[in-house]
Image (tube, helix red, strand yellow):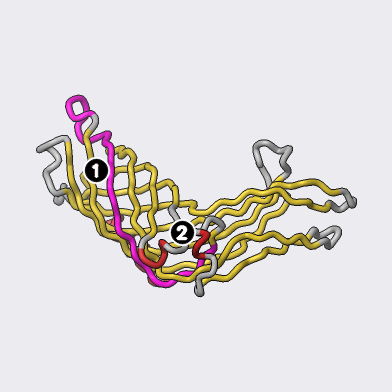
């Protein structure tokens, strides 16, 4: 984390001293497909991506900035009996979700000049850090919005450094009226990282006996009655971070 913090500070210093031709904000959907050993433990993930890029004044084809991605790859909802402090019981919704959060910094290079065509292919290279988390929440099923859990717990967390290389294409949606301002973006990235431990409620059933996995039952306690509730929340796996992500979204440029 010290290296990532130092890199972030250096990036801010560079931004403060540089002059830029334009900036952009991107929003989109991400489909994550694990590969190699991680594919044995995670089927796929669905997430959202937001990025912020700046284009230097003298290098119009190059942009650099930051990329944020949040993806959920495992989700389990079940009902269990829960004992309240007055001795009454009720069936509660037990929800366990597995997710990761990536924060990356990097650059992107357009392979054609922006004024030449509506379609702009590019390549990109990024590096950063990934946080894996598993959360358990207990909700009242009568609360349709699930606004606030009765209990919640962070069951597991871990992280690793990662880097990503990929490419894609941008399509200028309003080239005639307002060129290079509103674009559709589609891309694919190969992301690799160090060894990380994570849980998954939706792991492939054929892999539950994997020698790198362990069965996990979470215990949560009603603090008033001291009644212990136990719930199976999935399996813990350890592997290197290896995945492909496919993205589609929109870019707003100024």
- Mark 2: secondary structure: loop
In this view, the residue in front, 193 or 58, is 193
Res. 162 visible in picture: no
What is the magenta segment's predominant secondary structure? strand
Return the residue at label 1.
Answer: 22
Q: Which residues are magenta?
A: 174-199
Residue 185 is inside the magenta segment? yes
**Where is 114 relative to 63, above or below?**
above
Return the residue at label 2.
Answer: 42
To which quarter of the image does residue 208 belong? Answer: bottom right
Percent coordinates x, y for residue 140 in the rendering = 73, 43
Quadrant, the N terminus: bottom left
Residue shown at 62% from the left, 60% from the top: 233
Left/right placement of residue 189 relative to residue 29 reads left
Left/right placement of residue 108 relative to residue 9 reads left
Q: Residue furthest left?
A: 116
- C-alpha span from label 2 to label 1: 39 Å
Residue shown at 37% from the left, 68% from the top: 193
- Mark 1: secondary structure: strand
Q: Residue furthest right?
A: 86
Percent coordinates x, y for residue 35 in the rendering = 36, 61
Percent coordinates x, y for residue 94 in the rendering = 68, 51
Residue shown at 37% from the left, 64% from the top: 242
In this view, the residue in front, 188 or 131, is 188
Q: Residue furthest bottom?
A: 211
Residue 179 is inside the magenta segment? yes
Using the image, tell me which numbered label, if any, was put on residue 167: none
To which quarter of the image does residue 64 belong? Answer: bottom left
Q: Nearer the viewer, mark 2 or mark 1?
A: 2
């Amino acid at each position: 984390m010290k290296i990532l913090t130092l890199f972030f500070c250096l990036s801010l210093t560079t931004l403060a001293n540089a002059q830029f031709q334009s900036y952009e904000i991107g929003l989109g959907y991400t489909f994550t497909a694990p590969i190699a050993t991680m594919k044995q433990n995670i089927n796929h993930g669905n997430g959202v991506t937001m990025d912020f890029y700046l284009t230097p004044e003298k290098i119009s084809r190059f942009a650099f900035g930051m990329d944020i991605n949040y993806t959920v790859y495992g989700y389990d909802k079940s009902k269990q009996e829960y004992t309240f402090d007055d001795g009454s019981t009720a069936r509660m919704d037990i929800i366990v979700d597995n997710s990761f959060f990536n924060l990356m910094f990097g650059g992107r290079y357009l392979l054609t000049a922006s004024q030449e065509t509506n379609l702009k292919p590019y390549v990109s290279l990024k590096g950063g850090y990934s946080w894996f988390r598993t959360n358990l929440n207990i909700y009242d099923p009568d609360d349709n919005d699930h606004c606030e859990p009765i209990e919640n717990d962070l069951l597991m967390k871990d992280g690793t450094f990662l880097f990503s290389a990929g490419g894609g294409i941008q399509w200028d949606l309003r080239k005639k009226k307002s060129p290079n301002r509103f674009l559709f973006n589609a891309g694919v990235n190969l992301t690799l990282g160090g060894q990380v431990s994570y849980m998954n409620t939706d792991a492939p059933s054929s892999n539950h006996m994997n020698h790198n996995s362990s069965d996990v039952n979470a215990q949560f306690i009603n603090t008033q009655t001291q009644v212990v509730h136990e719930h199976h929340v999935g399996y813990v796996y350890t592997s290197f971070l290896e995945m492909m992500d496919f993205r589609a979204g929109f870019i707003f440029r100024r």
